[in-house]
Amino acid sequence: MYALVKTGGKQYRVAKDDTILVERIAAEEGAEVILNDIVMLGDGDKVTIGTPTVEGAAVSATVVRQTRGQKIIIFRRKRRKNHRRTQGHRQDLTLLKINDIAEDAKKLAPAKPAAKKAKPEAEATTRPAAKKATAKKAAPKATAAKKPAAKKAAKLD
């Protein structure tokens, strides 16, 4: 099964276990993201084309890492005017690993983490209280005693 996913203004053909480099997605490394903008789904001879997207379809992916692309040099010049401008740019990118493709997004709901065991009240109260960090104040600057300005002798004419 494959899907045509639209993200970051571009379209990518993905299948399970593919890795793709897309425009930056705000997510931590190791986080799971759901891509809902599916343009087309294909499964052998069965092809579903969206109008403009396939309703209910989703792709699950894991963020492998956040990275940056190669540096692009932008150079502008105007002939006969001695006018040149150079600018550089590196695009922020996200490396995604495709986990699953589903026609029904409800099947891709991320598994809830296991609930942590509740600690007894007595155990929580016996712990020593955390000490507050004391902020150091900056030492005042020592000012040197100023000498009075020397008096100028008055000119007698």
Image: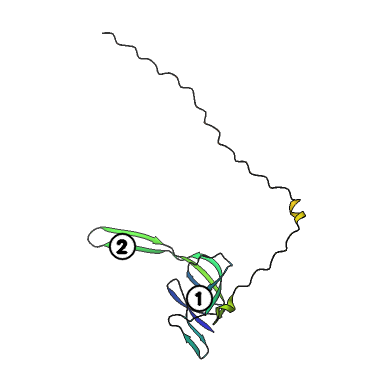
Point out residue 111 in the picture as x, y percentages from the top left corner.
63, 72
Vertical arrangement, residue 5 with respect to residue 87, above or below? below
Side (left or right) of 19 relative to 87: right
Say which of 143 and 46 sits in front. Answer: 46
- Residue drawn at point x = 55 percent, y = 73 percent: 61
**Quadrant in the rendering for residue 51:** bottom left
Disc 1 packing (10 Å; few <14; some 14–19; many ≥20): some
Quarter of the figure with the N terminus? bottom right
**Quadrant in the rendering for residue 131:** top right
Point out residue 142 in the picture as x, y percentages from the top left corner.
52, 28
Vertical arrangement, residue 47 with respect to residue 115, above or below? below
Vertical arrangement, residue 89 with respect to residue 148, above or below? below
The amino acid pointed to by label 2 is Arg
Which residue does the numbered mark 2 point to in the structure image? 76
- Residue drawn at point x = 32 percent, y = 11 percent: 154
Disc 2 packing (10 Å; few <14; some 14–19; many ≥20): few
Point out residue 140 in the picture as x, y percentages from the top left corner.
53, 32
Say which of 105 and 30 sits in front. Answer: 105
Q: CA distance from mark 1 to mark 2?
A: 39 Å
Mark 1 secondary-structure assignment: loop
Residue at the far left in the pictured view: 80
- Residue drawn at point x = 49 percent, y = 71 percent: 21
Vertical arrangement, residue 29 with respect to residue 137, above or below? below
- Residue drawn at point x = 42 percent, y = 72 percent: 9
**Circle nearer the viewer, 1 or 2:** 1
Mark 2 secondary-structure assignment: strand
Point out residue 133 in the picture as x, y percentages from the top left corner.
63, 43
The amino acid pointed to by label 1 is Asn
Say which of 2 and 76 sits in front. Answer: 2
Mark on residue 132? none
Quarter of the figure with the C terminus? top left
Which residue does the numbered mark 1 point to in the structure image? 36
